[in-house]
Amino acid sequence: MSNDPRIAYGAQCSWWDSIDKVGHTDRMSGPHTLPCCPKCGGMLFEVDSIQQWWTQVDQYDKGHSGYREFVEWLRGKCFKSWKLGAKWYIEETGKKVDI
């Protein structure tokens, strides 16, 4: 595990995790790589720390029942959208989530 506290999350997918878990684009297109989702290769955003991540999640959870628990379940999983992830979450856990 890295000492880097950043959290990365998908710009085009539902994946999120610590920065040390990101993938990288291949070098076929040139000498440099970009960080990407390790599952689908999509580009990423980041926040400075897990505390910042959970603060934002908890703020959203105030108006969207079950959201925090859903995001906890979602860690390290990649779906094309959060909506699709929620569908699988509901199917797997039987719990509801308001996204």
Image: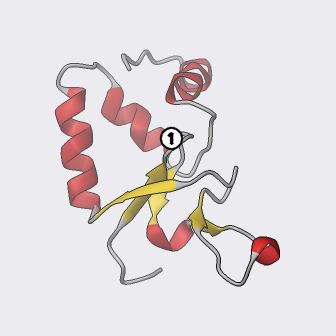
Q: Residue 18: x percent and y percent?
A: 44, 65
**Residue at (33, 24) in percent of width and height:** 66
Nearest the eye: 39 or 61: 39
**Residue at (27, 39) in percent of width and height:** 57
Quadrant in which the C terminus appears: top left
Q: Residue 7: x percent and y percent?
A: 38, 61
Residue lying farthest to the right in this orientation: 28
- How is the model colour-coded? secondary structure
**Residue at (63, 34) in percent of width and height:** 80
Q: Is residue 95 left or right of residue 5?
A: right
Q: Residue 53: x percent and y percent?
A: 28, 52
Q: Residues within 10 Å of mark 1 (few under 14, many from 20)?
A: many
Nearest the eye: 90 or 98: 98
**Which residue is disc 1 drawn over?**
74
Q: Label 1's element?
A: helix
Q: Is residue 95 above or below residue 76?
A: above
